[in-house]
Amino acid sequence: MRPNLRHTLFAAATLVAPALAQAADYLSIGSCPVGCAAYTWSAGIADVINKNVDGVEATAEETKGYVANIALMQGGELEASMATSLSAYEAYTATGNYAGTEPGKIMAWMAIAPVAMHIIALDGGPINTMEDLKGKRVGMGQPGGVSMLDANVVMNMIAGDDFEPFRIRLGDMIDGLSDGNLDAALWNGSFPLPPVIKLSAQRDMKLIPVEDDFFEALRAEYPPYFRLTIPAGTYEDVTVDTPTFGLANGLVISADVPEERVYLMTKAIMENLDTLAGIHPAFGNMSADTILNGFGSPLHPGALRYYREIGVPGIEDFVARTGG
């Protein structure tokens, strides 16, 4: 699949360069469908790497989502990708959704921001609480993406099979909401989500809060989820804080990428967070204090070297805890 992923941007290069040269020269960063925050992040990071690290040509790859990203990395078709902390741990240890795969191939790189479950509806519509999702037309996210798995968990707990699922990408879900073809859309992503900003500018929308009782039942079944809040003002129409839940979210990288290269790329990203914050506000909250948030799998040696160099708080405890 690697030639197909590269074809749009690097057709000539992939035709003439041997596989080992591609691995040394190119860095494909798996993200999600265009319009999602993770694609914006990947594109910004690729641009920073290209401008600051000699010998690397990075590109953001549109994919079906985080689940697909891990599979592509395990198949050698991506060098890096966006992932949740849960999927990063399971991929490294070959457990859970990745049981039976080769362990140790995918290593932690850097935390960016938490992903937050958005339950999106229109003002004046039939959805005012989570219970109202029963029997409704609900956007769930596309196959291959973590959001669809999270939406499945939510809807199974609320409604069992008493709803009509639409397993489509976020942009299509937002269009469906706006056109009246969906009653609600569920998406677990880092805020603000550009398509939701667009919806808020065009229609009166709202976010449905996740009640405490639901969250406690969810966490009892799925401990990696944690409580968080989407702040008031994140979207134009949402004037109150919205309680919800999420996972830690960040970058993972193949163990096969050379240590020196990862060191230089890590340094470039961390020294250009102000530039990246102009691309997406999530980068404005990144720092040495947050870079390890949520990870339970070992760091790539190149990233570990840089984090030790700048004195990331808790780095040695992290290494002892993860065995990295």
Image (spheres, rainbow, N blue to C red):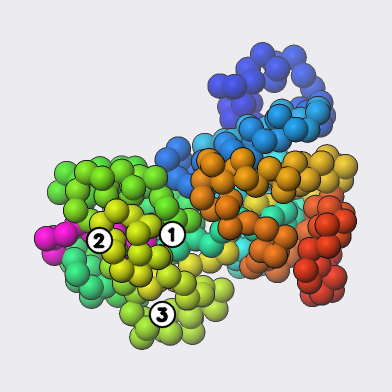
Residue picked out by circle 2: 206
Instruction: Find residue 9 and report its image quarter.
Output: top right
User: Which residues, given as a range, are shown in magenta?
Assistant: 118-126
Q: Position of residue 244 (x, y in %)?
A: 40, 71
Disc 2 to disc 1, C-alpha distance:
16 Å
Q: As rendered, which of 101 and 223 lies closer to the eye? A: 223
**Residue picked out by circle 1:** 188
Mark 2: few/some/many CA within 10 Å (<14, 14-19, 20+): many
Instruction: Tell me how far mark 3 sits from mark 2, CA to CA.
Output: 19 Å
Task: Determine whether, in the image, residue 7 is placed left or right of residue 148.
Answer: right
Q: In the image, what residue type sits under mark 1?
A: Asn
Where is mark 3, residue-wise?
215
Residue at 81% of width from left, 27% of height from top? 55
Give the amino acid type for the residue marked by disc 2 in the picture: Lys
Residue 257 seen by the camera: no
Q: Nearer the viewer, mark 2 or mark 1?
A: 2
Q: Is residue 8 left or right of residue 35?
A: right
Q: Nearer the viewer, residue 24 or 302?
A: 302
SS category of the residue bearing label 2? strand
Q: CA distance from mark 1 to mark 3?
A: 15 Å
Mark 3, Cα crowd under 10 Å, few <14 / some 14-19 / many 20+, is some
**Residue type of the residue flagged with mark 3:** Phe
Query: Which residue is at 78% across, 71% downward?
Result: 314
